[in-house]
Image (cartoon, rainbow, N blue to C red):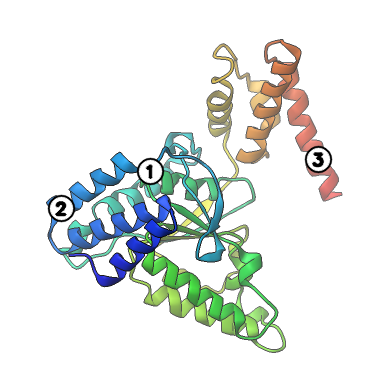
């Protein structure tokens, strides 16, 4: 049966009118029952949450009990994530292992649930966290780094403990963006050694964590991270800028919802080389807005102009 902690959280969610928290606790109870061999009850509880849960939305709000977490319920589809075939297979493996985690436990094994993603800005790291949460029907909790990392000695480590307490008590996908803020190489330590203490605390917390939650950390530069971190993660995914094939797929995915007759030419693909996935999506969105406002269709000339605007913007920053 449900633990006393589950019952307290269930009652608290009811009185706070927190439907998301209520659903999360019910799913926790289902996972607890499944872990103890009560598969039929676990399935029944999960089906109950599907019937009573409100419509999924992308509304983001601060977690009721922890302002360091921003909670959302993503609805992104995994088919819209444009990454290499190898990365795609590894993401599917994460999903497959989570869904079959109880079967793995019977053999003394655990599912992949601590993931590090490294790659340039705009290559899909944040989108991946949303996709995983959506595919597993779990809430996404984004850690607000500006509220975690402080200048006061010992305070950041205390806040990290609070986050890991939440990871243990509320099953979800927990996303640490700009992870180098707490995972920086200890060789780059500051004068008082606070960075070393923060990293040591994180290493301790993530190693001790045995919850059902998925932890995803993302960084733009893995070279900044301490080497001790890598063995604490079950998987490390390296994201790159899109290939010509990826770029073509991005254009088709984004533009076909507005204009199914759009033709992506080699000229456009070549011009788009060097742009990230996020930049190409912005080009598509700008083209769609332009077409709506002018009442005309999307043309290659417009797309080329928007691509060149993005490239020029990068050139200005590099200068």
Q: Who's the residue at 64% across and 27% down the image?
A: 269
In the rendered image, the vertical position of residue 122 relative to residue 161, given as above or below: above
In the rendered image, the vertical position of residue 157 relative to residue 216, given as above or below: below
Please tell me whether mark 2 or mark 1 is closer to you in this view: 2
Please tell me whether mark 2 or mark 3 is closer to you in this view: 2
- Judge from the rendering whether residue 270 lies leftward or rightward of residue 163; answer left or right: right
Please tell me whether mark 3 or mark 1 is closer to you in this view: 1
What residue does disc 2 label? 41
Residue 163: tell me if it is visible.
Answer: yes
What residue does disc 1 label? 135
Residue 228: tell me if it is visible.
Answer: no
Q: Are marks 3 and 1 in contact (CB under 8 Å)?
A: no
- 136 and 10: which is toward the camera: 10
For marks 2 and 3 on the same chain, the one whose residue lies earlier in the sequence: 2
- 173 and 166: which is toward the camera: 166
Q: Residues within 10 Å of mark 3 (few under 14, many from 20)?
A: few
Q: Residues within 10 Å of mark 1 (few under 14, many from 20)?
A: some
Tell me the distance, in whole angstroms, between the alpha carbons under discs 3 and 1: 35 Å
For marks 2 and 1 on the same chain, the one whose residue lies earlier in the sequence: 2
């Amino acid at each position: 049966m449900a633990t006393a902690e589950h019952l307290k959280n269930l009652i608290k969610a009811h009185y706070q009118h927190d439907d998301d928290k209520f659903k999360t606790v019910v799913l926790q109870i289902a996972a607890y029952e499944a872990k103890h061999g009560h598969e039929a009850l676990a399935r029944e509880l999960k089906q109950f949450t599907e019937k009573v849960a409100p419509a999924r939305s992308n509304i983001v709000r601060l977690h009721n009990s922890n302002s360091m977490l921003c909670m959302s319920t993503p609805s992104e589809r995994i088919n819209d994530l444009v990454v290499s075939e190898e990365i795609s297979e590894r993401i599917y493996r994460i999903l497959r292992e989570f869904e079959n985690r109880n079967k793995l436990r019977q053999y003394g094994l655990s599912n992949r649930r601590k993931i590090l993603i490294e790659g340039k800005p705009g290559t899909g790291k944040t989108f991946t966290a949303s996709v995983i949460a959506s595919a597993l029907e779990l809430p996404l909790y984004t850690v607000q780094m500006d509220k975690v990392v402080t200048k006061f000695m010992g305070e950041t480590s205390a806040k990290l403990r609070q986050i890991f307490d939440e990871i243990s008590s509320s099953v979800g996908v927990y996303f640490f963006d700009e992870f180098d803020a707490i995972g920086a190489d200890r060789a780059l330590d500051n004068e008082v050694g606070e960075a070393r203490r923060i990293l040591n605390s994180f290493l301790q917390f993530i190693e001790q964590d045995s919850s059902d939650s998925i932890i995803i950390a993302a960084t733009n530069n893995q070279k900044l991270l301490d080497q001790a971190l890598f063995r604490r993660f079950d998987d490390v995914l390296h994201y790159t800028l899109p290939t010509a094939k990826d770029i073509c797929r991005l254009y088709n995915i984004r533009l076909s919802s507005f204009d199914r007759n759009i033709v992506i030419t080699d000229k456009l693909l070549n011009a788009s080389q060097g742009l990230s996935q996020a930049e190409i999506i912005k080009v598509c969105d700008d083209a769609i807005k332009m077409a709506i406002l002018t009442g005309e269709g999307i043309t290659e000339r417009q797309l080329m102009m928007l691509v060149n605007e993005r490239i020029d913007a990068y050139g200005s920053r590099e200068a």
